[in-house]
Structures are given as structure tokens and as C-alpha cells.
Amino acid sequence: MQVNGRRYSKVVCFTLVVWVQSLAWLWPAQAKGTLTETGRLLYRGDFGEAAALAREHLKAHPDDSATRILLARALLAQGNYLGAYAELLRVVRADPMSVDGLYYLGRTSALLSQLEYQELVRVAPDSSRVHQLLAEAYEAQENKAQAEMEYLAALKTGPPSSEILDALGDLKREAFHFDEAAMYYQRAVKISRQDYGGVYGLGACALFNHDLPTAIAYFRQANGIDPQSSAARLALGDALLQDNQASAAVDELKAAVNIEPDMRQAYSLLARAYKKLGQPQLAQEALKQEEELAKKHEERLERTLDTQRGLILVAPELGQEPPRNPPAENHP
């Protein structure tokens, strides 16, 4: 399958422009003097004037991180990504705990990485890596069929890759095509016996097919490859529980929550295991822990939604004065 590198490059460029322009409408909080005027210029889209004013101010006040961040944002809006990166790097080096500096540095780094991807598409539009990149993009968009086509193209144009085989296996497993998924995982494990993704995937396929001894063997192998994998511990505990090995299941499930204390499913399975073992008090405690985690999850979700609502700014028409009391510029 041929990749339209030029079309993909245009899509990437358009995405970058839209994102960069959106940054320019974020109004700085509690700004005064030069900071206020620089922010007003940035807000109105006068990026060149905003950058010039910020640079002039920084000659006398080089340690003013708030103005330097505004300068970086103005440079971003002008398409000077490397210049913005350099300014933000200075902010973070001076203050490693600068929330705004870290935020914009992270976003700028992500933007620069997309530019590198764009260059990759330009240089080698039909390479295995480009197909893989496109597959991951389609997968993120929930376009599984197109993602599979691109992964297959990556497999065809490049050397054997356990990473791509695992990705194909995951797609098939998510679609409940476990036999096809297992074939991909087996090919991945043949390339690398220590391939965690392939071994875990084979265990998951066996578990869904109710082949408990095989599932347990693969999950034990996955745990040997990555002892700190809470997912493999959880899966092994689940398989042992279904195989009526409740005591062994408790050990694995407790290991899973030691690695990841907020793993609700592990507590749910622990309650079932304790109930099988005739330990109702421990079962009740596990259920209570699962309920508390569920409640905390709902509270975090609600706080996230509240934060997102607070960050939604309706941009006034050009030339209109900005709000008198704009929201604080703390963006997660």
C-alpha cells in the first residue's frame, strides 16, 4: 500500500497550525505592566509586536520567567518552534518546578516531534516506520480496520518486528478473534522469547478460550519477564481463581495491588477469592476497598470535567477588550 506522503504532511502541518493558534488565545492571569501589554498583544494576535515587547523587557529583566513564557508563546504562534523551545528551556532550567514552563515545554516538544514525523514521511513515505506511525494514528482514532492495513503494510515493507506483530495481535484480540491474535503473538515470540507483549497476549487468548493451564503457564512466563507488571499479576490471579486455585490467586492479586494500589478489578477478584476460601470478613474488606476506589475515580472524573469546563474560553472578536478577570493559566 502506498502512502500519500504529501497529503499526510499537509494534515500534520494543518494540525500544528491549529494547535499553535489555539495557544495564542490563552490569556495570562494577574499580569501587570509589560506583562499585561505583552499578553494583550498576544491575545489580539499581534504576535510580532508581542515578541518584540517581551524581548525588550527581558534585556533589563532576564529572570522574568512569566514574560519569557509569553515570548515563547508568541514565537510558537509565528512558527518559530526551535526559538520557543530554547526560551522555555531557559525557564525550566532556572525553575525546574515552573508549572507553566513545564507545560509549554512539553507541548512544544510534542510539536517538534510531529515535525520530525513529517520529515520522516517526506524522506521515506513507504517505509515500515511510516506505516507503523499511520497505523498508530488510525488506532488512536478507533479506526481499527485502517490501522490493521497499515500494520500489515509495515510488516511487509520492513524486517520482522515483534512490536508490529504484537500490535496486530492486540487488534485481533480486541475484536475477539483470539485464534488469529494467537498466531501473531506466536510469531512475535519466535522473534524474541522475552517478548512480554507476545507472551502476555498468548496467555490472554488462552484465558478467553478457557484453556486455563495454558493461560496460567503464559502469565507466569510474562511475570518472569516483567515482575513489576500489575496487569500480568492480575491476569494470573484471575486464571488461578477460575482454575479453583483460590489461595494462589490471592497471592498474585495481592502482589498486583502492591504494585498498583488503585487497581479496582484486583480487589473485586480478591473478594471472590476470599469468599471461596471461606473468609467473609476479608472478602467484605476487599469489596469495601473496591467501592472506595470506585468513588474516588468518580470524584477525579468530576474534578477533571469541572477543570475542562473552566478552561473553555469563548474568544471575543478581534479588537474587543479581553475579560477583566481572566482565569488563572494553570493547565494540566
Image: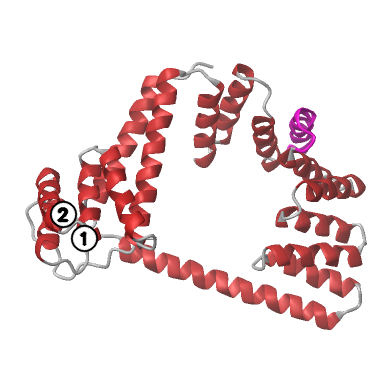
Q: Chief secondary structure of the magenta span?
A: helix
> For the residue marked with disc 2, what is the amino acid?
Leu
Foreground of the two, 98 or 44: 98
Nearer-the-camera pick, 217 or 1: 217
Mark sitting earlier along the chain (1/2): 2
Q: Tell me which amino acid carries mark 1.
A: Asp
284 up-or-down from 213: above or below: below
- The image position of residue 143, as x and y in percent, is 53, 36
Q: Could you tell me which quadrant the C terminus lies in?
A: bottom left
Taking the image as shown, residue 147 lies to the left or right of residue 261, namely left
Quick one: 88 or 116, which is closer to the camera? 88
Q: Residues within 10 Å of mark 1 (few under 14, many from 20)?
A: some
Distance from the alpha carbon under mark 1 to that under mark 2: 7 Å
Q: Is residue 189 magenta?
A: yes
Q: Is residue 158 left or right of residue 12?
A: right
Image: magenta residue range: 177-194
State the image quarter where residue 327 is shown: bottom left
Read off the residue under disc 1: 64
Helix, strand or loop at mark 2: helix
Pointer 1 with pointer 2, Cβ within 8 A? yes
Q: Which residue is mark 2?
A: 58
